[in-house]
Structure formats: structure tokens, C-alpha cells
Image (spheres, rainbow, N blue to C red):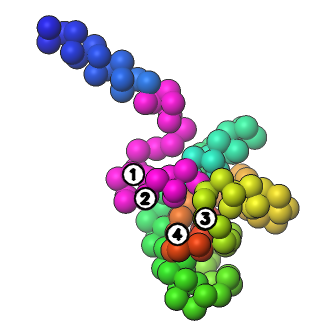
């Protein structure tokens, strides 16, 4: 019985890896909510289609992105903030709409798909989204 349960657990774990293998587990561990995880997934799926490496969550990028999203929510102003790297900002209620808007904008698309970037930070506060890339 123990072996069967172990196999079931391993099978379930394998399915998770296959399904979400392009997203590193560190996103959930870092407290990203489901919407933020969805945006990271969409970005990395887009990068995969272009044979680019997935972006990994960067601690400093992430903190800066969240802080800036909260600032924009507080001031109700969609404006770029001082970040040493690429930054995408947007408004929207869900990750897919924001991602699609960014992918429809050449400068945002080039940033998100930039081969030079290795780390990402995601911030969301209310309707405001921030992605920092480094």
C-alpha cells in the first residue's frame, strides 16, 4: 500500500512539473498571488516560444516592482518609476489582458522578450501592474 501511495504522489508531482515546468517554484514561495503567477507564466511561455530562457524572480526587482505598483495605486497615476533596468507598467484587472496589451506594444514586447534579461519582479496593487526586468 505504501508503494502505491508513493507512486501516486510521484505521478502527481510529475504532472505538476510537466504542466508548470517552465515556472520555477520560487514564485509561489515568494508570496506571489495567483494573478502575479499567471503573468509570470504568460511571459515565460512567450519567451519559450522564442527559444529564450525563462525569467527567474529577482528579489530586488520584485520588491521594487511591488513598491512602485503601490505608489501608483496611492497616487492614482500610471507613470514609470526609477528602476535600473527595463520596466513595464500597466493598468488592468487581470494578467492576460495586461500581458496582451504589452505584447501589442513594440517597446513593451521587446522588453519582455529581451534576451539580455534573466530576472523579473512583479508588482500589483489594485489595477496597477509593474514588471521590472534585469
Assign a secondary structure to mark 1: helix
Vertical placement of 81 versus 3: above or below?
Answer: below
Task: Tell me the distance, in whole angstroms, between the alpha carbons under discs 3 and 1.
Answer: 20 Å
Disc 3 designates what residue?
93
Q: In screen coordinates, is 84 left or right of 57?
A: right
Disc nearer the start of the sequence (1/4): 1
Q: In screen coordinates, is 29 left or right of 57?
A: left
Assign a secondary structure to mark 3: loop
Q: In screen coordinates, is 32 left or right of 112?
A: left
Assign a secondary structure to mark 4: strand
Confirm or deny contact between disc 4 and disc 3 (CB under 8 A).
no
Q: Nearer the viewer, mark 3 or mark 1?
A: 3
Confirm or deny contact between disc 2 and disc 3 (CB under 8 A).
no
Tell me the crowding category of disc 3: few under 14, some 14 to 19, or many 20 or more residues within 10 angstroms, Cα based: few
Does the magenta run of residues contain 28? yes
Residue 111 quadrant: bottom right
Confirm or deny contact between disc 1 and disc 2 (CB under 8 A).
yes
Disc 2 designates what residue?
32
Amino acid at each position: 500500500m505504501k508503494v502505491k501511495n508513493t507512486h501516486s504522489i510521484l505521478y502527481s508531482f510529475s504532472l505538476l512539473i510537466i504542466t508548470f515546468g517552465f515556472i520555477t517554484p520560487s514564485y509561489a514561495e515568494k508570496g506571489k498571488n495567483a494573478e502575479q503567477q499567471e503573468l509570470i507564466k504568460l511571459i515565460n511561455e512567450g519567451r519559450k516560444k522564442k527559444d529564450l530562457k525563462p525569467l527567474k524572480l529577482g528579489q530586488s526587482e520584485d520588491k521594487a516592482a511591488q513598491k512602485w505598483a503601490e505608489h501608483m495605486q496611492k497616487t492614482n497615476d500610471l507613470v514609470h518609476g526609477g528602476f535600473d533596468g527595463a520596466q513595464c507598467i500597466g493598468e488592468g484587472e487581470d494578467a492576460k489582458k495586461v500581458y496582451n496589451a504589452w505584447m501589442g506594444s513594440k517597446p513593451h514586447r521587446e522588453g519582455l522578450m529581451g534576451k539580455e534579461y534573466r530576472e523579473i519582479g512583479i508588482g500589483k496593487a489594485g489595477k496597477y501592474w509593474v514588471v521590472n526586468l534585469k
